[in-house]
Image (cartoon, rainbow, N blue to C red):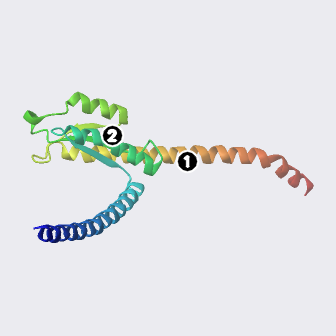
Amino acid sequence: VFAFSFSVCLTVVSSLMKLCKAYEVTLRAALEIEAEFTAMRDQYMRAGEGFIISYSITDRRSFQEARHFKQLIYRVRRTVDTPVVLVGNKSDLVHLRQVSVEEGKQLAREFQCPFFETSAAFRYYIDDVFAALVRQIRQHEAEVVRGGERKTRRSHSFWSRLKAPFHKKQQSEH
């Protein structure tokens, strides 16, 4: 009986070790995939001109993750003025609602962005979301251009004032 149980024990331990090695390889692969995904996600966030942050009104956790994604966009882009639209989806499932309209509006005020409740299943307000994002992007681009013009004018006028006395001396010497 002792020999049998010792043999069974060795077999169990051997199987567990194989399982652990397989788990370790799987875990390593999963971590590598996650690292690749994170790098690709960050690259898309750096290149993106605007973002739709969507959560399900039937899933409180997805609503809480919306704040995480906004912070992630800020961390990657290092600016708070990235065009964003906040979307509460599944508005057709009102009977399963876990997130109120007011909570969505409050988060949008915090993000300083437009807010919509949509139903992708019935295509309610989907076009409005994309139109709002395009407006946000165009507005942001216009602000960047205006800011660049102001900097150019300011630096040009400062430079002009700085070199003006030297420029006048050169002209009077000729």
Say which amino acid is labelled 2.
Answer: Arg
Q: Residues within 10 Å of mark 2 (few under 14, many from 20)?
A: some
Who comes first in sequence, dot 2 or dot 1? 2
Residue topped by disc 2: 67
Which percent across, then down, holds residue 7?
A: 16, 72
* Tag shown at residue 10: none
Label 1: state its secondary structure.
Answer: helix
Residue 160 horizontal side relative to residue 39, left or right: right
Quadrant of image for the N terminus: bottom left
Quadrant of image for the C terminus: bottom right
Which percent across, then down, holds residue 39?
A: 39, 61
Q: Residue at x 14, y 71 (%)?
A: 3
* Tag shown at residue 148: 1
Q: Quadrant of residue 10?
A: bottom left
Q: Residue at x 50, y 48 (%)?
A: 145
Residue 105 horizontal side relative to residue 90, left or right: right
Residue 63 horizontal side relative to residue 141, left or right: left
Which percent across, then down, holds residue 131?
A: 27, 46
